[in-house]
Image: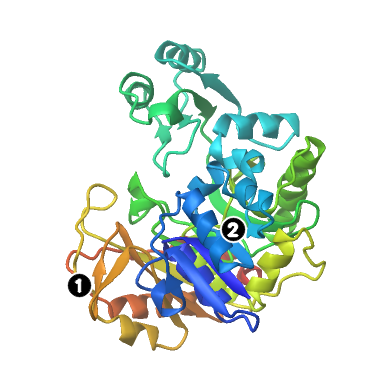
Amino acid sequence: MKCLIIGSGGREHALAWKIAQSPEISRLYIAPGNAGTSEVGKNIPIPADEIDSLLSFAEKERIDLTVVGPETPLAKGIVNLFQKKGLPIFGPNQAAAQLETSKIFAKKFMVRHRIPTAEFQVAASLSEGRSILEKWGGKPAVIKVDGLAAGKGVFICDTRPEKEAALKQIFSHKIFKSAGKKAIIEKKLNGEEVSLLAITDGKKYHSFPPAQDHKKIGENDLGPNTGGMGAVAPNPFLLPSVKRQVIQDMIAKTISGLAEEGITYQGILYAGLILTSEGPQLLEFNARFGDPETQAIIPLFEGDLLQLLLTTAQGNLLRTKPVFRKGSACSVVMTAAGYPGPYQKNQEISGLKTASELRNVLVFHAGTTKKGRKTLTSGGRVLNITGFGKNLTQAIANAYLGVSKINFAGAYFRRDIGQKALRQSGNHPKNLT
Ligand code: GLY
């Protein structure tokens, strides 16, 4: 079977690594991929958002399954395009992907289907934004641009100047262009965050082990937001009884709610939720595998990922639950100097082979490129080092052992990935597996 994976991050390397192990695979392509994906398949130099060129390639090579990693091609309608030509593709169509591509669509959907979420209002101008916030008094608020903003369109505002600055960036400076034509303003919720991913063919679904992302650049969750500095799975904050409730109240209701509205959701449904003192609330949907959550979840998956994704794309997800190994995984992101601002590129990376030969350590590339025999940095998030073990303590130790073997000028990583989860699992030792 020939498979094409679209994207170039750590998520796509993790997917490629696992799909390459399928007994059914004959050719594996990644477009555009990175230095790591070129070791498990063949990189094709087509950017992830050039959906017409990707279609031509898939038709020419008679690809049996295309797997979409990032959100941009979903927003552009790559799934509709491939399906029209009868080419199997894993991911939601443009209408279904609105759960991620429009925050307003997602919030209104949650309200229509009584999915627990924070109270919100929509603003289309600076003055509307100010008047909503004025009515709410001095309470902390979250301001999110409606469209896709590469993870940069969310402002968590505790003070009046922070709210004013966010509104000005969106409506006066228009830094998000058309993605920021409208924004939602919602009440800020407090609690631990959980990423719960489910795979669905539009009717049947299976959930994956819950994960926890670490979005801030600094230790103890300080500093600006990033694309994600590390993840652990399973996430011990989501107790099994609460997970069952979340699956009913959020995952199942979303899939059936979309179906009632004439939309079939096929792919990964990612629920980003927060565990508040009033119960779990849905913060956002993503219409794809999470990054870096995938780099922690996929190493725990024991089945044939190619088969799982193909049957889903064919609308025929098996009732048998996917099997995940017992134990935990921890993935630590190594970034380039300057990230999440303008960052340094073209630094030679050493120690990759030593790290990847360690037991229970996997090295997934993100912003890397090959130059002759050298591997150089080419992105802000450079590598994801995943460790696993029979418990979270071992998983964290293995991940950081891998990190310790790797070097490049200006390398940065958080030293506390998994520590909050570890404290929690100490409180509930039975909930880790
Ligand atoms: N980890 C957050 C995301 O994938 O958007």
Q: Which amino acid does label 1 sit on?
A: Glu
Q: Residues under labels 1 and 2: Cα distance?
A: 38 Å
Q: Residue at x 50, y 15 (%)?
A: 132
The disc, 1 or 2, on the residue closer to the chain's N-terminal end is 2
Q: Is residue 13 left or right of 274 when viewed as pictured?
A: left
Q: At numbered mark 2, what does the secondary structure look like: helix, strand or loop?
A: loop
CB of mark 2 near ligand 1 (< 8 Å): no
Residue under the image location 51 percent in, 25 percent down: 185
Task: Using the image, tell me which numbered label, if any, was put on residue 38.
Answer: none
Q: Nearer the viewer, mark 1 or mark 2?
A: 1
Disc 2: which residue: 237
Q: Residue at x 59, y 77 (%)?
A: 327
Which quadrant, please, contains the N terminus? bottom right
Mark 1, Cα crowd under 10 Å, few <14 / some 14-19 / many 20+, is some
Q: Where is residue 232 in the image (x, y as percent from the top left)?
A: 50, 65
Q: Where is residue 353 in the image (x, y as percent from the top left)?
A: 32, 85
Of 52 and 319, which appears nearest the observer?
Answer: 52
Quadrant of the snapshot with the C terminus: bottom right
Left or right, 417 with reference to 55: left
Asked if residue 422 shows in the view, the reply is: no
Q: Position of residue 173 (x, y in %)?
A: 30, 23
Q: Does the residue labelled 1 lie within 8 Å of ligand 1?
A: no
Packing grade of label 2 (10 A; few <14, some 14-19, many >=20) is many
Front one among 126 and 140: 126
Q: In this view, does 329 lie above or below 356?
A: above
> For the residue marked with disc 2, what is the amino acid?
Phe
Q: Mark 1 sits on what residue?
A: 348
Query: Which residue, as the protein is rendered here, is positioned at the far front?
Result: 60
Dividing the picture into quarters, in which one does residue 281 lie? top right
398 up-or-down from 136: above or below:
below
Closer-to-camera residue (255/300): 255
Q: Is residue 209 visible?
A: yes
